[in-house]
Image (cartoon, rainbow, N blue to C red):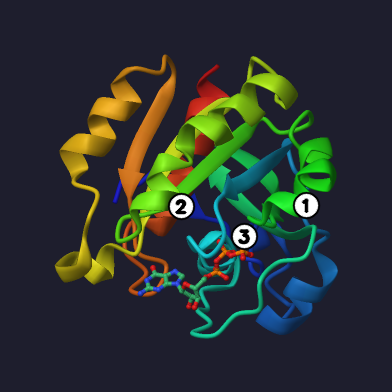
Amino acid sequence: MDSRYEIQRRAGGGSANASPALGAQSRRRKMPPRPADYKLQIIIIGSRGVGKTSLMERFTDDTFCEACKSTVGVDFKIKTVELRGKKIRLQIWDTAGQERFNSITSAYYRGAKGIVLVYDITKQETFDDLPKWMKMIDKYASEEAELLLVGNKLDCETDRIITRQTAERFTSRISGLRFCEASAKDNFNVEECFLKLVDDILAK
Ligand SMILES: Nc1nc2c(ncn2[C@@H]2O[C@H](COP(=O)(O)OP(=O)(O)OP(=O)(O)O)[C@@H](O)[C@H]2O)c(=O)[nH]1
């Protein structure tokens, strides 16, 4: 993985300047955490059951839930990362995939600097829904927002319906849309996808 993509460790930062007389434990207690240089909001959207919550939880807590409850409305988690020498506090919004929540979830698009649009590589309908989600982005999100399409459940390769080429063809028709495949279950490419998005936001 690119060495720039270094996840911030909660404890120990900046302890080299502390008095040598202090033990490691007290140094940790005395040092106030360095405030974040940037605060960014990222929103995860896509059809029901594609793995939005699972991707968020894998990225923020490194956990995976086999039988998660469907998201009602919106939920969020915080994760702090270091990229390009900056400390960035990410607020990640996980939205419900069910259409009946669209009026609630659409309110969260505007503030997002990054949008993660997810489909399930084993479910045709979740890919067919992408134009509908793109319309939601056009309608509610900032034009400045960075967009990332994620084909999730890569661990289910034998059940794959949507080829990588098909998804790449879709991506190439939409300016500024990036693409990656990942598995929240196997923890494959999840961190890389999120960090690439954040890096693109910072580069802007
Ligand atoms: N095999 C596999 N299953 C996954 C993966 N990611 C999520 N799942 C499963 O897919 C189901 C739905 O996952 P969620 O994360 O709840 O999906 P969601 O998109 O948040 O769903 P809604 O909240 O209903 O919109 C769960 O049973 C997960 O365990 C993955 O990468 N691989």
- Can see residue 143? yes
Q: Residue tagged by mark 1?
A: 101
Q: Quick one: 131 or 22, which is closer to the camera?
A: 131
Measured Cα–Cα span from mark 3 to mark 1 = 49 Å
Q: Are marks 3 and 1 in contact (CB under 8 Å)?
A: no
Name the quadrant containing residue 70.
bottom right
Q: Amino acid at mark 1?
A: Phe
Residue 200, percent across and down? 48, 27
Residue 190, percent across and down? 41, 57
Q: Which label is found at residue 89?
A: none
Element class at badge 2: strand
For mark 1, does the 10 Å Cα neighbourhood hold few (<14), some (14 to 19), or many (20 or more) residues? some
Measured Cα–Cα span from mark 2 to mark 1 = 35 Å
Q: Amino acid at mark 2?
A: Glu
Question: Compared to 28, does 166 lie above or below?
Answer: above
Residue 115, percent across and down? 59, 36
Q: Residue tagged by mark 2?
A: 6
Q: Residue tagged by mark 3?
A: 16
